[in-house]
Image (cartoon, helix red, strand yellow):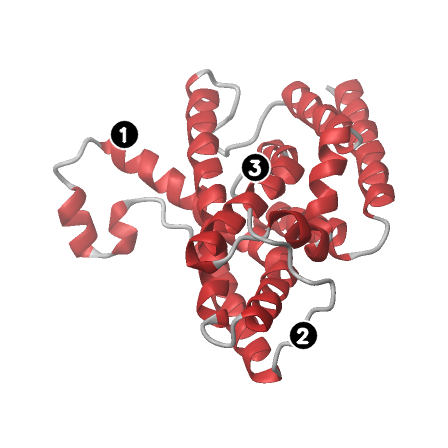
């Protein structure tokens, strides 16, 4: 690991800050647009895509579309909460080298997205198994009992030491970079991987809540996105996580009683 950055971080010029935030917002908006349209078959991408995929078994195409849904959804949900970390990286990188800080910031983002893409592979496999075993319906929602179990498990995870440790690094960019700093473009990608790993550790159970109300339920997706933002951006993250944990457990118990 390279030497840690100084605690006094230079201010990022307004132009660079606006460029980075605009690009992050654009990528997030495009991801949400994809989710709103939610292509469910190759023909939804146009005649050319349908013709190119026609020789493939339908199951392969369907699996790829499910993976695309998860991968794009993770960008739409998680990228906004990573914005403070990206800006802090750009600030530190600019202070240590006056050139290429914006480009390296996007290399950092690429590492972050790569981790969530790997999570999307696991989520796709999980969804396929749940659908094959009829635990998840065609609407991609679970039964009341399974939903209750997921809610309670997610609530319990909210108050575990692992959740708190990962959340601490996700909420404090300075603390993260003080202990994980690496120089250069390769270092930026590796730090993006590290941050993405902490982020997955913090939020993976929240992502499983998508199965409770339906993976394609955009209102539910938006609600979970807001919860992630609240946890990461507001003060007192531990209290927020514990409060939401208690609420999830109570909701799970209530759902189980009504089943």
Mark 3 → mark 1, Cα distance in angstroms? 21 Å
Which secondary structure lies at badge 1?
Answer: helix
Q: Is residue 73 visible?
A: no
The residue where tag 2 is placed is 10
Residue 94 sits in quarter = bottom right
- For disc 1, the neighbor class at 10 Å (few under 14, some 14 to 19, many from 20) is few
Could you tell me which residue is drawn at 27 percent across and 37 percent down? Answer: 61
- Expressed as whole percent of the image width and height from the top left, the position of residue 205 reads 64, 32
- Going from N to C along the chain, the mark reached first, 3 or 1, is 1
User: For mark 1, what is the residue?
Assistant: 59
Q: Residues within 10 Å of mark 2 (few under 14, many from 20)?
A: some
Residue closest to the eye, 98 or 22: 98
* Foreground disc of the pair 3, 2: 2
- As drawn, is 244 to the left or to the right of 75? right
Q: Are marks 3 and 2 in contact (CB under 8 Å)?
A: no
Q: Secondary structure at mark 2?
A: loop
Which of the two discs, 2 and 1, sits closer to the camera? 2
3D distance between C-alphas at marks 2 and 1:
52 Å
Does 73 sit above or below residue 258?
below
Q: Position of residue 193 (x, y in %)?
A: 50, 45
Q: Which mark is residue 214?
A: 3
Q: Position of residue 117 (x, y in %)?
A: 44, 43
Element on which disc 3 rests:
loop
Residue 65, image x and y in percent? 35, 42
Q: Left or right of 205: which side holds 107?
A: left
Image quarter (top left, top right, bottom left or bottom right) of the C terminus: top right
Q: Is residue 67 above or below residue 223?
A: above
Residue sitting at the far top: 133
Please tell me the numbered disc located at residue 183: none
Other residues around mark 3 within 10 Å, as few (<14) / some (14–19) / many (≥20): some
Whether label 2 touches label 1, CB < 8 Å: no
Q: What separation in Å lies between label 3 and label 2 (alpha carbons)?
A: 44 Å
């Amino acid at each position: 690991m390279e030497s840690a950055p100084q605690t006094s971080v230079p201010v990022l010029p307004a132009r660079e800050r606006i460029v980075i935030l605009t690009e992050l917002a654009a990528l997030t908006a495009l991801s949400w647009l994809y989710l709103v349209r939610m292509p469910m078959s190759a023909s939804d991408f146009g005649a050319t895509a349908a013709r190119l995929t026609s020789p493939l078994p339908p199951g392969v195409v369907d699996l790829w579309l499910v993976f695309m849904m998860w991968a794009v959804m993770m960008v739409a949900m998680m990228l906004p909460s990573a914005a403070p970390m990206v800006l802090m990286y750009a600030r530190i990188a600019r202070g240590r080298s006056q050139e290429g800080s914006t480009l390296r910031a996007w290399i950092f983002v690429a590492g972050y997205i790569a981790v969530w893409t790997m999570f999307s592979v696991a989520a796709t496999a999980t969804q396929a198994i749940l659908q094959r075993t009829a635990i998840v319906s065609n609407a991609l929602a679970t039964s009341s009992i399974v939903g209750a179990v997921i809610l309670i498990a997610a609530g319990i995870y909210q108050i575990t030491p692992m959740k708190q440790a990962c959340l601490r690094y996700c909420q404090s960019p300075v603390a993260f970079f003080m202990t994980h700093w690496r120089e250069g473009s390769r270092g930026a990608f590796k730090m993006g991987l590290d941050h993405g790993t902490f982020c997955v550790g913090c939020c993976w159970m929240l992502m499983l809540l998508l199965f409770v109300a339906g993976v394609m339920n955009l209102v539910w997706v938006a609600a979970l996105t807001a919860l992630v933002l609240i946890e990461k951006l507001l003060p007192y993250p531990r209290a927020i996580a514990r409060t939401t944990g208690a609420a999830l457990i109570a909701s799970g118990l209530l759902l189980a009683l009504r089943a």
